[in-house]
Amino acid sequence: MICKILAVFGYQIQRTGARAAIASLWSVDDGGTQHLMDAFYSALQKPNTTKAEALQAAQIALITGNYEALNQKRGIVLDPILQNNQLTTASNNLNHPYYWAPFILIGNGL
């Protein structure tokens, strides 16, 4: 149910006059979303980059951990998580689809 609400909200934003909107298909992690959006806007600043290309570049940056390709360093440290009885940070695990897969671009991707 939540995924339908989030996607519908994205379409509603577009109906208010936005040329494009990024929506998620399910509930997302705030810290992971911040990393994705930081990477998205960094990629969007490159000349002749479309919104669709910027979203793809941001998703690839999370998957590969290569933020330098976007001339960006990771900004925040996410909340620590316990994995295999060892304390780690979620920022080291942003390649998991949970952090990058739910985002879609609705509307004009140019």
Image: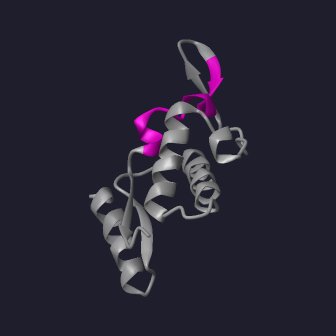
- Point 61% across, 63% down: residue: 47
Residue found 31% across the figure and 57% down from its top:
3
Toward the bottom, the furthest residue is 17
Front in this rendered view, residue 101 or 26: 101
Q: Along the line of sight, which residue is nearer the eye, 56 or 25?
A: 56
Picture coordinates of residue 40, whole percent (x, y): 56, 55
Residue 17 quadrant: bottom left
Task: Determine which quarter of the picture holds residue 10.
Answer: bottom left
Q: In this rendering, would 74 be left or right of 110?
A: right
Is 68 left or right of 58, judged from the image as shown?
right
Q: How is the image coloured?
A: one colour
Q: Nearer the viewer, residue 30 or 13?
A: 13
In the rendered structure, which segment of residues is drawn in magenta?
A: 87-100
Q: Residue at x 38, y 49 (%)?
A: 102
Query: Split into 4 quadrants, where in the image is the N terminus?
Result: bottom left
Residue at 45%, 44% (x, y): give it. Answer: 100
Q: Does 36 appear above or below 14?
A: above
Quadrant in which the C terminus is drawn: bottom left
Instruction: Kindly give the residue lying farthest to the front in the view shown.
Output: 48
Residue 52 placed where, x, y %?
43, 60
**Residue 28 on image: x %, y %:** 46, 49
Residue 2 magenta-drawn? Answer: no
How many discs mark residues in the rendered view? 0
Left or right? Give the position of 25 relative to 44: left
Please, is residue 15 above or below residue 38 in the view? Answer: below
